[in-house]
Image (tube, helix red, strand yellow):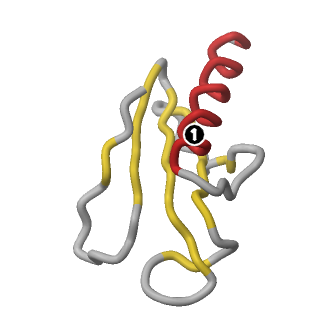
Amino acid sequence: MQFSRVINPVGDMQIWNASGDGFSFVISYESRSGPGLHGAPGFVASWRPLHDNRGAVKVIGSPFKTFEAAEEACETMLGYLTERH
């Protein structure tokens, strides 16, 4: 999967998305204070089926210290999800 940064009107929000094999993944950067999303500091990854109107599920291990770690966790989760189907 190739993550792309989401361009949005709130410039301080850091959000990336990617999709593959029927699943959508999102990585967002969160911090306790300051602009953007608030939460435990780090990169939070989540997934949901593309064609099913369900809420997102947080990838185990979130938040991650680096974007690369979050991206790798998403790839691992995609492998697990596609293996099950």
Quadrant in which the C terminus appears: top right
* Residue at the image point whose x is 56% and y is 71% from the top: 30
The crowding category of the residue bearing disc 1, from other C-alpha atoms within 10 Å (few below 14, some 14 to 19, many at least 20), is some
Residue 14, position in %: x, y?
A: 40, 65
Write the residue at 51% across / 29% down: 23
Q: Nearer the viewer, residue 25 or 41?
A: 41
Task: Classify residue 68 as left or right of residue 17.
Answer: right
Rendered view: 52 above or below 30? above
Residue 42 % position (x, y): 61, 64
Q: Which residue is mark 1?
A: 48
Say what amino acid the circle numbered 1 marks: Arg
Residue closest to the far right: 60
Q: Position of residue 50 (x, y in %)?
A: 47, 33
Secondary element type, mark 1: strand
Q: Nearer the viewer, residue 31 or 57?
A: 31
Q: Quadrant of the N terminus?
A: top left
Number of on-image labels: 1
Q: Position of residue 31 (x, y in %)?
A: 58, 77
Identify the residue shown where x is 59% and y is 35%: 74
Tell me: residue 36, above or below residue 71. Answer: below
The residue nearer to you, when weighing 74 against 82, is 74
Quick check: 31 left or right of 59? left
Write down the quadrant of residue 78 in the picture.
top right
Q: Residue furthest bottom?
A: 34
Nearest the viewer among 76 and 23 is 76
Q: Report which quarter residue 60 is drawn in.
A: top right
Q: Residue at x 49, y 89 (%)?
A: 34
Q: Quadrant of residue 44?
A: bottom right
